[in-house]
């Protein structure tokens, strides 16, 4: 046993004597690499906290904005750490950067549409046309914003369907944000019979609006004559309400219109058309 231990000691002693400088240099490199990794992890975490706190203080930055910039900061920190580690290992980073630049140029030319999505995504994040949870209408698609990424924006329609829209499509189309403003106006059109009293109809609907607790008193609700249609006088019921109460108020008022008109003795007419037959007697005599 002592002989084996002595032999093993002599083996490592010979390796140390022959490669002492190389072992010390390798150990130094390993320690420096570990320190760089530790420092990168600390800096990445600190930057993440700084971005989170800055977003909380500003109060207007979306959650997706925080995620994108946190990921960007992590990529930059770890990319710099990788270059430092390669340099410590004796690898020429200048040539690597040259190759990466050439590859990046080729990829940029091949993926110009994807890069336009990234540019549009950054512009949308900075302009803050909408945030997570907003209900928007972007040209041919509409729904609630679920996530905002660099390449696409994820929406959920009112019937629960998932839609991923490229950012450049949204950026190049008009965006109608239904959730941005705190107040929202509702318009409901209803027709009353020409035989009914128009002032009575307006008064009845106005009273119905004034008794509704879901709408605002200022701006005051209105009942306006919208159109003298073929079969009815169309009245527009107009009201303002808090954005989050809009649909509750809309459905409540729509359901209350018919009972209110009926209780006042007013009627909602069916579509009808008056047909006048010209020269009817002559036609009958001709048939005889």
Image (cartoon, rainbow, N blue to C red):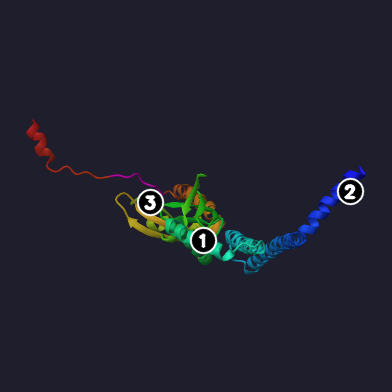
Q: Nearer the viewer, mark 1 or mark 2?
A: 2
In-front residue for pair 118/130: 118
Please give the residue where the numbered disc 3 appears in the rendered image: 191
The quarter of the rendered structure image containing the C terminus is top left
Looking at the image, which is closer to me, 156 or 63? 63
Residue 264 locus on image (x, y percent): 45, 50
Residue 185 is at least partly visible in this image: no
Q: Choose the circle earlier in sequence order: 1 or 3.
A: 1
Residue 271 belongs to the span the image colors magenta: yes
User: Can you name the residue that lies furthest to the top here?
Assistant: 288
Q: Earlier in the sequence, mark 1 or mark 2?
A: 2
Image x and y of residue 268, in percent: 39, 47
Q: Earlier in the sequence, mark 2 or mark 3?
A: 2
Which range of residues does the magenta coloring cover?
266-272
259 up-or-down from 183: above or below? above
**CB within 8 Å, label 2 to label 3:** no
Q: Is residue 228 visible?
A: yes
Q: Which residue is mark 1?
A: 99
Separation (CA) of disc 2 from disc 3: 108 Å
Which of these two is toward me, 231 or 181? 181
5 left or right of 142 in image: right
Q: Residues within 10 Å of mark 1 (few under 14, many from 20)?
A: few
Quarter holding residue 203 = bottom left
Q: Which residue is mark 2?
A: 6
Q: For mark 2, give the secondary structure.
A: helix
Q: Residue at x 11, y 34 (%)?
A: 284
Question: Which quadrant holds the N terminus?
Answer: top right
Question: Which label sits in the foreground, 2 or 3?
Answer: 2
């Amino acid at each position: 046993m002592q002989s084996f231990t002595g032999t093993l000691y002599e083996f490592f002693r010979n390796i140390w004597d022959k490669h002492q400088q190389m072992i010390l240099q390798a150990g130094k490199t390993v320690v420096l690499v570990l320190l760089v990794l530790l420092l990168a992890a600390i800096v990445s975490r600190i930057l993440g906290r700084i971005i989170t706190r800055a977003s909380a203080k500003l109060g207007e930055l979306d959650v997706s904005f925080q995620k994108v910039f946190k990921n960007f900061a992590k990529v930059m920190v770890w990319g710099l750490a990788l270059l430092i580690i390669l340099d410590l290992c004796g690898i020429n980073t200048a040539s690597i950067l040259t190759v990466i630049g050439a590859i990046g140029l080729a990829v940029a030319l091949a993926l110009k549409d994807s890069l336009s999505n990234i540019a549009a995504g950054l512009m949308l994040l900075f302009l803050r046309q909408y945030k997570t949870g907003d209900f928007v209408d972007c040209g041919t698609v509409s729904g609630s914003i679920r996530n905002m990424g660099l390449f696409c924006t994820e929406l959920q329609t009112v019937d629960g369907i998932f839609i991923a829209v490229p950012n450049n499509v949204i950026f190049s189309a008009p965006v109608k944000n239904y959730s941005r403003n705190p107040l929202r106006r509702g318009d409901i059109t209803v027709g009353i019979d020409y035989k009914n009293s128009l002032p009575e109809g307006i008064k009845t609907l106005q009273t119905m609006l004034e008794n509704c607790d879901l709408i605002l008193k200022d701006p005051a609700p209105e009942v306006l004559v919208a159109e003298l249609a073929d079969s009815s006088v169309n009245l527009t019921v107009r009201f303002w309400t808090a954005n989050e109460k809009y649909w509750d108020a809309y459905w409540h008022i729509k359901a209350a219109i018919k009972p209110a008109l009926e209780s006042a003795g007013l009627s909602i007419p069916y579509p009808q058309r008056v047909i006048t037959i010209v020269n009817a007697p002559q036609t009958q005599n001709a048939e005889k």
